[in-house]
Image (tube, coloured by chain):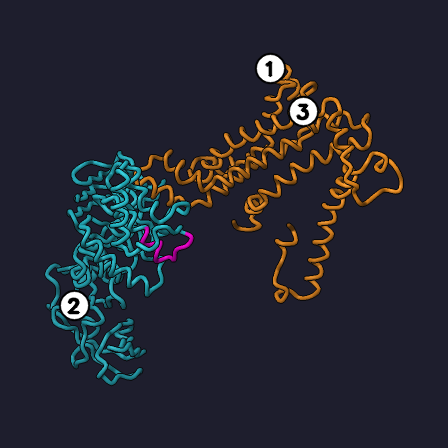
Amino acid sequence: MADIDIKGVEKRFGSYTALHAIDLTIRDQEFLVLLGASGCGKTTLLRIVAGLETATSGEVRIGGRRVDGLAPRDRGIAMVFQNYAVFPHMTVFENIAFGLRMKKVPEAEVDRKVKRAAGMMHIDQLLQRYSGQLSGGQRQRVAVARALAVEPAVLLMDEPLSNLDALLRLEMRAELKGVLQESKTTTIYVTHDQVEAMSLADRIAVMNQGRIVQAARATEVYADPATRFVGSFIGNPPMNFLPAEPNGAGLKVAGLTLAPPKAASGRIEFGIRPEDVEIRGDGLPGAIRVVEPLGPHKLLTVDVAGHLFRAVVDNEHAVEPGQAISLRPKPGRGRWFDAETGLALQ
Amino acid sequence: MTATTLAVPATEIAAPSRWGIRISTILLCLWVLVPLYLLAVNAFNAREVVTGWPKAFVPTFDIDSLSFFWNYAGVARALLNSVLVAGLTMILSIGIGAPAGYALARFRFRGKGSFRLLVLMTRAFPLPLLALPLAIFYIRTGLDDTIWGLALVHTVLALPFAILITFSLFTSIPVELEEAAWTLGCTRFQAFLKIVVPLALPGIAASGVFAFVTSWNEVFAASVLTVQNQTLTAFLLTSLDVSPLPLKFAGALVLVVPALIFLFLIRKYLFSLWGIANR
């Protein structure tokens, strides 16, 4: 039960800056996902909160208490690692009990709490096994149970599902969400998987090159990306971008003139999600290159004024490669970006 | 030993190279085993058989030579010295080598690469070159002819391997295990004791045994630096000329067998050190 306040946290490795003055506040009981490509600094930030890495400058507060000078054990946190880090020389029971025993919790209570945590993660049957006798998914459960057993104020998870196979990942994702909602622990969860981020997060903080570029609810990050990067990173297939040219009072995008944003100056790009277009006359003219039927809908790759453009359309449309097509952006779905800075324009 | 490491499914290798491997394996084994066998046969034969002709290739299991060796003046004392020096070498090598190996495995520090190289460089100077200055230095400081003095030299010889074995050992233990322990309430030292030590213990023991064997087998420094407190190797070297043949065989056997047993026990760690097989 604690909020986390990160103020001006910077991390430099020699001349390389891994984190640029990060400011981020995580509310009590919030589930925040740090999302970004590998090398963007998300794991470094998590490890700074955990105390496994020291920030070059800046402050971290957990529950109002400044923790940057404290050892990991004094921060009231628990962490789940990407490779699970289940102690191989201890049984599952001893693993889950480890944190409680370090805190000198009476043995009867240790027993009760271990069994409760094991029950939550459905590993009651495995308590006497060693890590070597467990599957990847089971080890993952042990790692989460071990972290939850100490009832931490803050739970930190570093790509906990990325070592599992696709089916298991889906199953564990839903289960984790349930368990964590119940435990009401403030959670920071690091992942590079946007689907995972969208499905789990109360709020997503998208990171790029050591900066948080947008921190907002999943639907908002998806619908209103703060930068061109967010639009291209989130969504599969990602947002389409087309250059825009001034044309009288409006902006001309591939032959279609649209109403411009309020503060428009310099080079501007138009962005639209693949599912936010419909096949209609007086739209963006293009030629279909590839048609991929995906079951519920079709994914089209279209050549629009020399730019590759992806569109998701209903199955009922009869479309063939080579065919000319006109794609009309749905009203209110198009977004404008400054081509120089990548920032979204209102 | 060699034969099992090289065992490869027959189907994967064409016939000629398979025979090549077999023959070289057999030759290598003979190279090592024949002298050992002759040594054992002669150590377990009666004195008359050892000195007589034709030579016997089947032992008669006569422990006459061995008991003669055991009662030979100075042997028991030299044996005790060997054990003491080797034991001290083992403790010193682990005491200095394991922390150095841990530091190499876990910390980034300036000059880490050169340090790893320098560790091996200690073996680049031949001991005979160092023997005279060392002997003079020892006489000046009063370390000459002491068990401690010899154990120090043996530690220097054994240390590179102790450091490299423990380095590869600690590297093989994921750092996340320690980090998990820190987040679960351990100090750095507690995590080391509760997580790293239990996992590393067999390997640390192996590096200790290796240091023991290094010291046990060492002749040169032992002969130069000890006079009264000779180790078994030094004792045998100085009395080889004057001792009868059976004594030499018995002495050689007593020297070889412990070393063989120990090396056999820790072979998998030595393999992993050289990257031959993963644990």
Which residues make up the magenta segment?
Answer: A132-142
Quick check: B112 above or below B85?
Answer: below
Q: Name the residue under label 3.
A: B131
Both labels 1 and 2 in a single chain: no
Q: In this view, does B145 lie to the left or right of A215?
A: right
Q: Where residue A334 is drawn, which disc sits there?
A: 2
Q: Which corner quadrant holds the C terminus of chain A? A: bottom left
On the image, the x and y values in percent for residue A8 come to 22, 41
Q: Which residue is drawn at 59% across and 44% down?
A: B267
What is the three-letter code of the residue carrying label 3? Ala
On the image, the x and y values in percent for residue A79 come to 29, 46
Which of discs 2 and 3 lies nearer the camera? The answer is 3
Q: Which residue lies furthest to the right in this view?
A: B53
Closer to the chain start, of discs 3 and 1, is 3
Splitting the image into 4 quarters, where does residue A10 fall?
top left
Q: Is residue A278 left or right of residue B24?
A: left
